[in-house]
Every structure is written in structure tokens, then in C-alpha cells.
Image: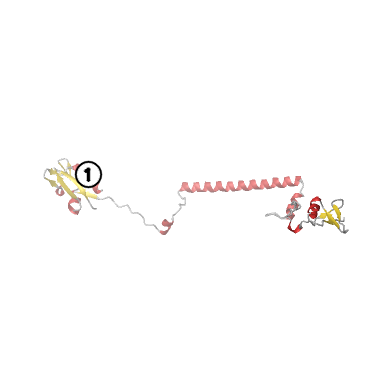
Amino acid sequence: MRTYEDTFSGQRIFPGKGKIYVRGDSKVFRFQNGKSESLFLQRKNPRRIAWTEVAKKRTRRTVKAQRAIVGASLDVIKERRSMRPEARSAARAQAIKESKEKKQAAQAAKKAEKAKNAAQAAKGQTQRNISKQGAKGAPVKVKKPPVVLSCDISDWVWTREGCVHETLAWRAASVLGCRIQVQEKKNNIMTMLATCLAQRREVRDEVDDGLLGIQSYRL
């Protein structure tokens, strides 16, 4: 197909389109439309005209391509696509069956392990989790035996009002954190406690109206 070129704009002119202009000197000009003809007759310079750019719309066509994916090659994909529905259903049923069997085996093993741990716990053979400090050999706490105060009637502390009452003796013993051992009874008054006060001399007692008040102590 023969096409011509617009003398003014340079665009293509297809057959049956455009105009032909013949000047007096027999020179032929071809124009695509009236706009190019008018601008030519106005003696406009085509280099100085702001032409509107015309671009052909291009659309991206979707191209289908088959390629391998992770876990399946292209041959495997083609083979599975070409499988018959009966064979595909049988393969799916077999895969489901294997998955169920594997799950049941795991559950049975878990139950057996749980029963074993329960039996060991009943026998007192359960394994204890040892901490890092215990593995290194943490110091063992030794429970100290309680202090026993043994007193006699000769060890009693006397005040201006008389002998210390047994209630105050029990009070002093509770402050000192020790146990009282009675050796002798006289006039229903228990002989106790005064040994610690007399020997250690670490407890300060103050006598006020015949009462013994424990103010400070050091064991």
C-alpha cells in the first residue's frame, strides 16, 4: 500500500485521505487535513509550532507460561494434569489414609509415654529438673537445733519485789527464740530461763515495779 507524506507536518497520508495543492509554479503539496493546509498558507514555520504528540495505545497482552514451582517439577505438573479423575481420586484417598495412620501412631506413642511417666511417678522415680545452681552444688541448708535453757532455783534473778514471775520468764524465752526445760518446782513457780540471762550477759533487763522487760538482746 502506497502512502504519502504531509508536506507541512510530515505525517503519513493513506490512500483516499488528504488534499493535493498545486501552486502556480506547478509544485505539488500534499496535506493530511485542513489544519496543515491552513498553517501552510499562513506561511507558519512547522519547527516553531507546539505539535500535539499522538501515540498509539499499547496494551500488555497476558502471556501464559508453564514453569516449575517449589516441590514439583514441570514434568510432574504435566503428569498430574493429564491424570484421569479416577486415578486422581485414588491417589488422594491413599494420601489421606497415610496421613491418618501417621497421626494415630503419634498419638499412641504420646499416650504410652504419658502412661510410663505416670507409673514412674507412682513408684517415686520421677526425674526432677535440676537447676543450674543445683547442678553446680548449691550449699545445703542445715537446720540448727533449738536452744534449750536449763535452769535451777539457784540461778534465779531476784528483784526488790521478789522472784521473777513465770509469765515473764516465758516472755523472755519467746524473745530469745529458745525452749525452756523445767528442772525443779517450788511454790508453784517454774525454775527456768535465768541461766541464759546470767551466763551470756547479752540480754539487758530492767526492773520496774517487780516486772522484767526485755529491751535488747544479741544471740
Residue 46 percent across, percent down from the top left: 76, 57
- What residue lies at 17% left-to-right and 48% top-to-bottom? 205
Numbered marks: total:
1
Q: Nearer the viewer, residue 77 or 44?
A: 44
Q: Nearer the viewer, residue 132 or 195?
A: 132
Task: List the single residue furthest toward the right.
Answer: 26
The quadrant of the image that shows the N terminus is bottom right
- What residue lies at 20% left-to-right and 48% top-to-bottom? 215
Residue 74 percent across, percent down from the top left: 73, 55
Task: List the single residue furthest toward the left.
Answer: 160
Residue 11 percent across, percent down from the top left: 80, 55
- Label 1 is placed on what type of residue? Arg
Q: Secondary structure at mark 1?
A: helix
Tell me the residue that label 1 is attached to: 171
- What residue lies at 15% left-to-right and 46% top-to-bottom? 207
Colouring scheme applied when the structure was drawn? secondary structure
Q: Nearer the viewer, residue 18 or 177?
A: 18
Position of 70 compared to 193: left or right?
Answer: right
Residue 66 percent across, percent down from the top left: 74, 53
Q: Nearer the viewer, residue 133 or 24?
A: 24
Tell me: residue 40, above or below residue 185.
below
Instruction: Give the class, few, some or many, for how many residues have Cα within 10 Å of label 1's Cα (few <14, many ≥20).
Output: some
